[in-house]
Image (cartoon, grey):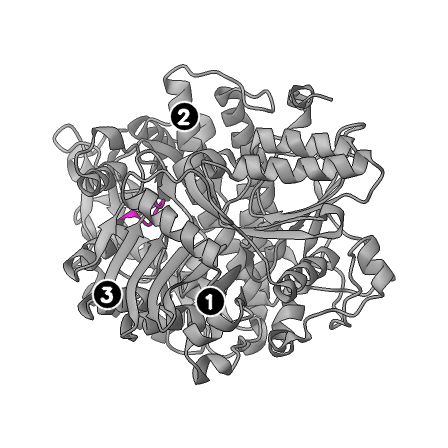
Amino acid sequence: MKLNQFMRPEYFTNRELSWIAFNDRVLEEARDKNNPLLERARFLAITQSNLDEFFNIRVASLRKMVTVGYDKPDAAGMSPETQLKAIAAATHTMVDKQASTWSRSLQPKLAELNINLKHFEDLTAKQVQFVDDYFHQELYPVLTPMGVDPTRPFPFLANNSLNLALRLSRPEQEGDKRRSFAMVQIPAVYSRVLRLPDGDNQFMLLDDVVRQYVGELFVGATIQETAMFRVTRDMDMDVAEEDASDLMKEIQSQLKKRQRGKVMRLEIESNTDKHIRKRLIKALDVDEEDVYAIKGPIDLTFINQLVKQVSGHEELQFPSYTAYMDPEYSERSIFDMIRERDLFLHHPYDKFNPVIEFIRQAATDPAVLALKMTLYRVSSKSPIIQYLKQAAANGKQVTVLVELKARFDEENNVHWAQELERAGCHVIYGLVGLKTHSKLALVVRREEDGIRRYMHMATGNYNDVTAHFYTDMGLFTANPDMGIDASNIFNMLSGFSEPPYFHQLVIAPLGIRDFLFDRIDGEIRAAKAGRKALIQMKMNSLSDTAMIEKLYEASAAGVEIQLIVRGICNLKVGIPGVSENITVHSIVGRLLEHSRIYSFYADGEELVFLSSADLMNRNLSRRVELLFPILQDDIRERILSLYGLMWADNVKTRVLQVDGTWEHLDLRGVEKLDVQAYLIKHAKELGDELNQVAAPEEEVQDTRRFIPMKAPEQSDQED
């Protein structure tokens, strides 16, 4: 078949609906009785923040398309307007499910353990006095009553701010059926969860405190109705780089504009008075389908604050664990270690410390001449930033690409870019029209036998915080060809260099898609010749239409394709003659699966590549991404073993079905394996190269489906 024969709408799932299905898989974790109770609550909070960002960006983007009359359908045949209607239906269902998960399941179970989120009428006398004092001494001076009338226009409400709407009557309105309208914003400068005295783990929401005393802000008026509500705005930035003489100023300008984006969603309490509802809908200019009536507290991200304040009850959280770090990292120069062999790290099972140590030693080592690095997202107190500044102070040539357009990290990255510039680092912002998403650090060192380049390349960001709960893979190497390629990449990013070719590394948008196509073609040729053909890929999202078509072509030719896709998956399985040889797993568990692995059997050569890129059009066409080969045999075997373990997971894995749904594996009569729990438990042994899972040699060669070592027994999932 020709590639375009696979380009049919019925062969694809809509990207946005696929994302909603992913968020529903996260919501399943909140409903899974096998997870500790407070962790279930955290999963519920994650689904809320995920949904907020989805409206901020994805829904906002579709709305803009509709506004300008763009009606071209996506690969699944859905126009932007059709997608918005489908999204509204799916998210209304999800929001109801979120609310019921909290009110009918999690909150009652917490109450059984005397962890209570109280209303005012349930407070003890001591708690009433505490809340009364707290309101008058802390809250009252900060709160601002905002009346709305012909002389006071409807105020601007910030994205995700929580507000209390009121209808009230005043003495001068006696006999008038009309009511005045006012609002009070719940101040975000305070924790929304207030810990109460007179008992452990007794809490109250700040919004309930404000509601109880709000009458004191409107002296002389009578409060008739109140309703809590929240708005979600368009937070997508349009940065016209080609028109911006100073990209940093343009980003800062857009950050201010973004806060005033159009309202994408209005959340209100389900029992909101109809007059307040109409007033808000009109003032905020939203359609009825954009109104979400919440049966319970609005904005469930407050649960994160609640969980942090719960004292005791360690049994209600995932047990802590210690990531592994080879003692050699503390005993030797990291450059000596890398010069001897490539080094592999699998976070968070392996500590992130060696990456920080790599930059620290580069900053202080007299033999180091230059340090170059790409930064996409870093923590607010990044030690790497401090060492880069130290390197510049020590006279090293320091070049740092800071991606100012990293979504929702723009402000943080502007701050770090300015800090680095003040410290004497050469800061660059990448290429016009392209985000730089690659994860690459290059150290140039003068040694006895000449100049040598040392590199760290990874699938995840240089963020010491997310490295504790994102699963990512990284490689240290001093491979000369890769070193030349890395230098060429930085020269391309900082100047006008256009290398004619790369020796080992592959970058997007210039070549990753074509490179993967070539590897897939090799498997197609093998399958057609009757030889074993196997493709194994792991990524966050799979939505690139051309890549899906290519995988369909490979499947139709007889190539076995195993995909681990955490989130969006626009590919469909089980289409006769098209995708019958494709199986898709999604692992959603304690840790966020973030590593990207691309592996090809290649007639037994078993080529393995790691990458910063997902198989999405934006990654392959509009970002600077990096794909790098694993050349050292032991590391390649370790990654293949890890992939085999992930594929063998049958506890946190959902399998994509022919109808587009995701289902858990049938665990009856089989040994259970939660791969994340297994890797956490065996972090030290795995780090000591005991991670090679025992399996009959013929089985490994035949299917690479590994027999896992015995994992702890777990009860079945909640229906």
Q: What label does residue 63 carry, if any?
A: 2
**Which residue is pictured at 34% across the width and 74% down the height?**
361
| Front-lying residue, 80 or 403 | 403
Give the image location of residue 201, x and y in percent.
45, 73
Give the image location of residue 445, x and y in percent.
34, 67
Residue matched to label 1: 307
Q: CA distance from mark 3 to mark 2?
A: 48 Å
| Front-lying residue, 498 or 286 | 498
Q: Is residue 409 magenta?
A: yes
Number of marks in picture: 3
**Which residue is pictured at 44% across the width and 61% down the height?**
456
Q: Is residue 663 left or right of residue 129?
A: right
Q: What label does residue 396 carry, if any?
A: 3
Q: Is residue 392 visible?
A: yes
Asked if 648 appears above or below 517 in the picture, the reply is: below
Magenta segment main secondary structure: loop
